[in-house]
Image (tube, grey):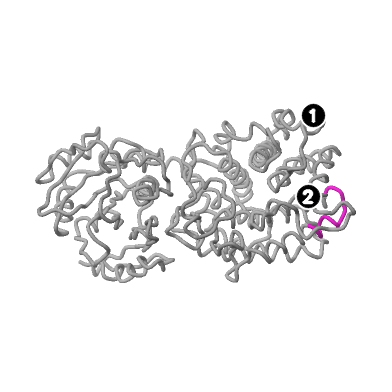
C-alpha cells in the first residue's frame, strides 16, 4: 500500500503552491480516505513545512488520531502499512532534521531568527490535538523511546514495543508533549522511534492492536471547547474583557460594544439593555472630564468612538451623538470642505474600518448626508491604495502581502458601515457589492480547520485568530441581515466559528493573535510578526464581537 496519489502533490507543497482542497487517496481497493496536502509553517529559508492531514476524524470522533512527525526526509512516496492507516486517522508532518531547541521553545513565535520551525511544530501539534504522536528520526536499527509520564497509553506501549528505551531528555519533544500542554489545551502521549526504513509502522500497528489508544487530554479539551454555545463563550470572555476604556481607542471600545450587545441579547429575557459598568466607564467622556479627542487623535481613536455610536443608537442621548459627530468631523477641513479621506489613515487597509463606520454612524445619527458621502469617499480611497486585482487587500502600497488582519479590517469596516448607511443612499449598493466581492475572494483561503491565516493567501503562515474572527463576523452578520447568500457562506461561518472557539480558553487565553502591526516592508516581515498566546485585549475584542453576533445568528436560525 503506497501513498502515491497524495504524494504526487507534495512537490507542489514544497514549492509553496499548496493544494486548496482535500485529496482522495485510494489506499486499498475497498477503502478511500480524505487527505489534505498542506503545510504547518514556514522555515527560515521560506520553504513550507509540508504535511498530509487525514480529515476523516474530528475532535468528536471515536477513531484515534495518530500524528507522525517524520524528521528523516522530504516527502518521497514512503509506504503507509495497513495496521496504522486502516485503524487510525493518521496524519504526517515532514518536519526536517531535529534542531537543538528544547521544548517548549521559549519565545520567538514565529519570528525566531534561527529556528521558527520548532515553534510552528509545537503550537500546531497542540491545536491538531492527536491522541498519539510518533516522532521518527534516523537510526541504523529500529529503537523506541518512551518518556516517563502518567499515561496508560505510554505505559502499555513501553511494555509492547520492541527495543524500548526510557527517554532521558526531559526537554525533548516527546517528553514535553506527554507532560506539558501545547497552546494550553492539554498533554498528548508521544514516543520516538529511530529507524532506517518504514518498517516501524508495522511494528507500531501490531503493538497498538493489543489495547485502546483513548482520547488525549488535548483532544478532549478541544472537543469540549467546540461544544460551548456562543452565549457561554461570550460570558467567559466578559470576565476578562470589556471592563475599561482608559482612552478612546478601538480595542477597548469594541470589547464594550461586545458587552453592550450581549446585554441587548439578554434584554429580551427581562434584563437591563445597558449594563451599569458601561455607563460608568463612558461617563467621563460624556461629561467632558476626560477628553475623547485631542490633537493626536488617530484612526484607532476615531473607530473607538463606535461605542458612543452604539450607545447613541440605543438611547438617543444627544451627548453621545455629539461625541460621534466630533470624530466624524475630522473628515472635513476647518472650512467644511471634505478631505480626501479620514486623516491618520497611514495608507493602510486598516483605514476601511478606522474611518468609514464612524462616518456612516454620524450620517444616521445626525441625518446629514455629507457623512454618508465621506464614508464612501474613505472606502474608495482605501480601495485605490490597497485593493488587489484578486479581490484581497494588500496591507499598504509598500508590499503586496495580504496581511490577515489587513483583510479583516476591510471586512469589518464595510460590514459596520452598512449597519448605518441608509437604504436611500445612492452609494450603499456600491459598499454592499464591495463587501460581497471581498468576502467571496476570501472564501477559497479558509483552511481545513476553518481559519484564515496571518497572510491570507500563504497557508504556510500561521492560522491567525483575529482575522478569522473578523471575517467570520462579517459573513455571519451579512447572512443574518440578508446581505449575503446563506447557501454560499453558511459552511464558512460554521467552520470559522468552530476555529475561533477552539482557540478560546475559559480563562480568556487565546491562541495566535498577531501583535499590533504597522506597514511592513516584505512578505517575510508579515510572516515574522509575533503571535501571542495568552490573554490579549485585541483578540478578546474581536472574539466578543463574533460571539455576540453568533448568539443572534444561531438564535434566529432555530
- The answer to whether any part of residue 338 appears in the image is yes
x and y, in percent, of residue 212 in the image: 23, 43
Task: Tell me the residue at 24%/49% (across/down).
Answer: 134
Residue 108 horizontal side relative to residue 357, left or right: left
Chain part drawn in magenta: 365-374
x and y, in percent, of residue 372 in the image: 81, 57
Q: Which one is in front, 467 or 332?
A: 332
Q: Which residue is mark 2?
A: 361
Kind of element beneath mark 2: helix
Looking at this rendering, what residue extends furthest in the right direction? 335
Residue 413 horizontal side relative to residue 136, left or right: right
Classify 520 as above or below 215.
Answer: below
Residue 79 horizontal side relative to residue 238, left or right: left
x and y, in percent, of residue 204 in the image: 17, 51
Residue 330 included in the magenta stretch of the image: no
Lower sequence index among marks 2 and 1:
1
Whole-angstrom CA distance, mark 2 to mark 1, is 24 Å
Which callout, 2 or 1, points to the residue nearer the camera?
A: 1
**Most common secondary structure along the magenta stretch:** helix
Q: Which residue is mark 1?
A: 289
Where does the N terminus fall, quadrant-wise?
bottom left
Q: Residues within 10 Å of mark 2 (few under 14, many from 20)?
A: many
Tell me whether circle 2 and circle 1 mark residues in contact (CB < 8 Å). Answer: no
Q: Which mark is residue 393?
A: none
Kind of element beneath mark 1: loop
Displayed quadrant of residue 56: bottom left
Residue 516 horizontal side relative to residue 96, left or right: right
- The answer to whether any part of residue 92 appears in the image is no
Q: Which one is in front, 266 or 283?
A: 283
Amino acid at each position: 500500500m503506497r501513498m502515491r496519489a497524495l504524494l504526487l502533490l507534495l512537490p507542489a507543497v514544497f514549492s509553496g503552491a499548496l493544494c486548496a482542497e482535500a485529496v482522495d487517496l485510494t489506499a486499498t481497493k475497498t477503502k478511500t480516505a480524505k487527505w489534505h496536502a498542506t503545510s504547518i509553517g514556514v522555515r527560515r529559508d521560506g520553504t513550507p513545512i509540508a504535511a498530509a492531514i487525514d480529515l476523516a476524524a474530528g475532535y468528536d470522533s471515536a477513531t484515534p488520531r495518530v500524528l507522525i512527525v517524520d524528521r528523516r526526509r522530504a516527502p518521497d512516496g514512503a509506504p503507509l502499512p495497513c495496521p496504522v492507516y486502516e485503524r487510525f486517522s493518521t496524519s504526517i508532518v515532514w518536519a526536517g532534521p531535529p534542531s537543538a531547541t528544547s521544548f517548549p521553545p521559549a519565545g520567538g513565535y514565529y519570528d525566531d531568527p534561527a529556528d521558527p520551525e520548532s515553534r510552528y511544530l509545537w503550537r500546531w501539534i497542540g491545536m491538531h490535538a492527536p491522541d498519539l504522536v510518533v516522532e521518527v528520526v534516523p537510526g541504523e536499527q529500529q529503537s523506541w523511546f518512551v518518556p516517563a509520564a502518567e499515561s496508560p497509553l505510554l505505559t502499555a506501549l513501553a511494555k509492547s514495543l520492541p527495543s524500548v528505551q526510557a527517554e532521558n531528555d526531559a526537554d525533548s519533544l516527546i517528553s514535553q508533549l506527554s507532560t506539558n500542554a501545547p497552546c494550553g489545551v492539554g498533554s498528548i502521549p508521544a514516543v520516538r522511534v529511530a529507524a532506517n526504513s518504514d518498517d516501524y509502522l508495522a511494528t507500531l500497528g501490531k503493538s497498538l492492536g493489543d489495547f485502546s489508544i483513548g482520547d488525549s487530554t488535548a483532544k478532549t479539551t478541544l472537543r469540549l471547547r467546540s461544544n460551548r454555545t456562543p452565549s457561554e463563550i461570550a460570558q467567559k470572555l466578559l470576565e476578562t474583557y470589556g471592563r475599561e476604556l482608559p482612552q478612546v481607542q478601538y480595542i477597548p471600545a469594541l470589547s464594550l460594544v461586545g458587552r453592550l450587545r450581549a446585554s441587548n441579547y439578554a434584554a429580551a429575557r427581562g434584563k437591563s439593555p445597558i449594563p451599569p459598568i458601561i455607563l460608568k466607564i463612558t461617563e467621563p467622556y460624556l461629561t467632558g472630564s476626560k477628553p475623547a479627542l485631542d490633537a493626536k487623535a488617530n484612526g484607532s481613536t476615531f473607530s473607538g468612538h463606535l461605542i458612543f455610536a452604539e450607545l447613541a443608537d440605543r438611547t438617543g442621548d444627544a451627548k453621545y451623538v455629539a461625541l460621534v459627530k466630533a470624530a466624524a468631523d475630522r473628515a472635513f477641513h476647518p472650512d467644511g470642505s471634505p478631505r480626501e479621506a479620514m486623516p491618520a489613515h497611514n495608507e493602510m487597509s486598516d483605514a476601511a474600518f478606522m474611518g468609514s463606520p464612524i462616518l456612516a454612524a454620524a450620517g444616521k445619527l445626525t441625518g446629514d448626508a455629507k457623512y454618508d458621502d465621506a464614508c464612501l469617499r474613505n472606502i474608495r480611497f482605501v480601495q485605490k491604495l490597497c485593493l488587489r486585482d484578486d479581490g484581497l487587500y494588500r496591507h499598504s502600497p509598500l508590499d503586496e502581502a495580504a496581511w490577515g488582519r489587513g483583510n479583516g479590517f476591510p471586512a469589518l469596516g464595510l460590514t459596520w458601515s452598512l449597519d448605518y448607511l441608509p437604504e436611500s443612499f445612492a452609494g450603499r449598493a456600491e459598499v454592499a457589492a464591495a463587501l460581497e466581492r471581498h468576502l467571496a475572494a476570501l472564501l477559497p483561503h479558509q483552511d481545513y480547520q476553518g481559519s484564515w491565516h496571518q497572510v491570507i493567501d500563504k497557508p504556510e503562515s500561521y492560522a491567525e485568530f483575529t482575522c478569522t474572527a473578523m471575517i467570520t463576523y462579517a459573513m455571519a452578520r451579512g447572512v443574518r441581515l440578508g446581505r449575503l447568500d446563506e447557501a454560499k457562506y453558511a459552511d464558512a461561518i460554521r467552520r470559522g466559528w468552530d476555529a475561533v472557539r477552539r482557540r478560546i480558553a475559559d480563562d480568556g487565553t487565546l491562541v495566535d493573535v498577531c501583535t499590533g502591526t504597522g506597514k511592513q516592508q516584505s512578505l517575510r516581515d508579515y510572516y515574522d510578526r509575533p503571535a501571542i498566546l495568552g490573554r490579549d485585549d485585541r483578540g478578546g475584542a474581536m472574539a466578543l464581537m463574533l460571539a455576540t453576533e453568533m448568539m443572534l445568528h444561531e438564535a434566529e436560525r432555530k
